[in-house]
Image (spheres, grey):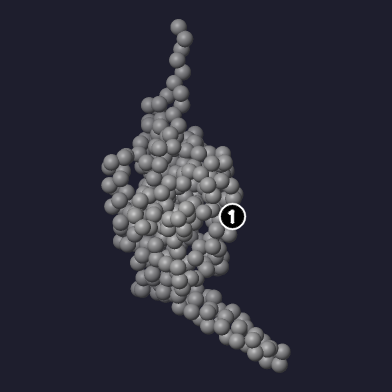
Amino acid sequence: MIEQVTPQPKIGIALGSGSARGWAHIGVIQELAKIGIVPEIVAGSSIGAIVGAAYASNQLDKLDSWVRLLTWKEIFNYIDISIVGGGFIQGEKLLELARTCIEEDSIESLPRQFGMVATELDTGREVWFQDGSILDALRASIALPGIFTPIKINGRWLVDGGLSNPVPVSLCRAMGADVVIAVNLNGDIVGKHNRKQIKPNTSIDNKSNDNETTLLERVTSQLKNSLHEQKDILLSRLFGDSLDSPGLFDVTASSINIMQDRLTRSRMAGDPPDIILSPRLSELGLMEFDQAAIAINEGRACVQRMRPALEHLLEGYT
């Protein structure tokens, strides 16, 4: 009698939206690998798309090293203020940042099967990216409405994937995953996050010698000063200038997180993953991208808390 060998299941991981808390995805993936779980298929939405792209391109360790050293000064250097275009931040400098950790390849050429989600602004439909430019798709998936300007791809204006599919379990299954591990960052955060006091310092030194400065240079210098003063005001309004005053990002992102939490619950009820990992990050602010170590460590801890359930799940397929 020929012994039948049961094929190993294809494991997929759905990385959810959640702003700065998304660095927890790094710890989740790293800790899963330590216990022998290496997803072949990865789907991401918003910040989950960024981490997913790094993982799918074998650049996760590089992203880990970079985000652990990230400071607010560097973050502000990558903020390109826009006064037109449907958002405060253009996002072009963020693409430059992405290039330092993610190779500029096509999605279909990556070592692992990868997809990400954006939302069509006109219809509200989710848009899946499984081929084409990684950076264009990333720019669409992270375009939080009111904060980042939308991007037009193939004639459609696209915004953040979290608006339509915060934890893309359905995309994971569509790409062929037999087992789907979902990472939900929004389960415990509604109304709980703290705001970090941020006082942007974008002033510049424009000392010049009047005897050597032309009229055009003086006008240019004054214009630069004026723009930088406006940038200070915009950044203050964007992030909040005190612990008692929520910034535009806090208000917008918190409101969207309320919606995403409800949407995630609804979608998971209709299309449940095989297991849900929920890092406990309610105390981490939405814009605290410089606190990556906290998020990554909690991602690791979350996997350890769920290790018995993960091992039991996979035993059923062996």
**Which residue is pictured at 43% across the width and 34% down the height?**
176
The C terminus, quarter of image: top left
Q: For the view shown, which residue lies furthest in the right direction?
A: 212
Q: Position of residue 282 (x, y in %)?
A: 36, 57
Residue at (56% x, 68% y) in the render: 77
Where does residue 109 sit, x and y in percent of width and height?
A: 57, 41
Q: Quadrant of the N terminus?
A: top left
- Classify 204 as above or below 58: below
The residue sitting at the bottom extreme is: 211
The correct choice, above or below, for 228 with respect to 96 in the image is below
Q: Position of residue 316 (x, y in %)?
A: 38, 26
Which amino acid, by three-letter code, is at mark 1? Arg
Quadrant of the rendered image containing residue 312? top left
Relative height, residue 73 to residue 184 (above, below): below
Residue 21, position as x, y percentages in the image: 43, 55
Q: Nearer the viewer, residue 150 or 294?
A: 150
The residue nearer to you, when weighing 146 against 37, is: 146
Residue at the disc numbered 1: 99
Q: Secondary structure at mark 1?
A: helix
**Label 1 crowding class (10 Å Cα cut-off): few <14, some 14-19, many 20+?**
few
Q: Is residue 130 visible?
A: yes
Quadrant location of residue 182?
top left
